[in-house]
Amino acid sequence: MFKGKKEELDKVVETIKEKMKESKYSVAIGHYFIEKSDEVTFEDALKKSEDLMYLDKGRYYQETGHNRRR
């Protein structure tokens, strides 16, 4: 769990993505920031993060043209 501000988390995620571009590996990341005042269950936050991860993964395949099912 990340304990900080949303902007800090966004920066960490972008740094990870940039570092991964420099390698021969790829990573799909979904992250969802919950404010203390938000009434969100862990399961809802996990589902939202997972949905965002699949969107990120879809963007990767669309941008690179890689077909993972080959």
Image (spheres, helix red, strand yellow):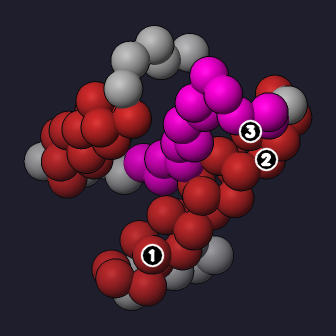
Quickly name the residue at label 1.
Answer: 59
Q: Measured along the vertical axis of the image, is residue 40 above or below residue 68?
A: above
Q: Please tell me whether residue 37 belongs to the stretch shown in magenta.
A: yes
Residue type at the position of mark 2: Lys
Quickly name the residue at label 3.
Answer: 45
Observer able to see residue 61: yes
Indicate left or right for 50 with 9 as reference: right
Q: Are marks 3 and 2 in contact (CB under 8 Å)?
A: yes
Q: Earlier in the sequence, mark 3 or mark 1?
A: 3
Q: Earlier in the sequence, mark 1 or mark 2?
A: 2
SS for dot 2:
helix
Residue type at the position of mark 3: Ala
Picture coordinates of residue 5, whole percent (x, y) = 36, 26
Question: What residue do we see at 65% from left, 46% from top?
Answer: 49
Question: What residue do we see at 28% from left, 30% from top?
Answer: 8
Q: Quadrant of the C terminus?
A: bottom right
Whole-angstrom CA distance, mark 3 to mark 2, is: 5 Å
SS for dot 3:
helix
Whole-angstrom CA distance, mark 3 to mark 1, is: 21 Å
Quickly name the residue at label 2.
Answer: 47
Picture coordinates of residue 55, whole percent (x, y) = 57, 68
Residue type at the position of mark 1: Arg
Indicate left or right for 12 with 37 as reference: left
Q: Quadrant of the N terminus?
A: top right
SS for dot 1:
helix
Report the magenta residues as a range.
Answer: 27-40
Indicate left or right for 19 with 50 as reference: left
Picture coordinates of residue 40, whole percent (x, y) = 80, 35
Of residues 26 and 28, the one drawn nearer to the viewer in this rendering: 28
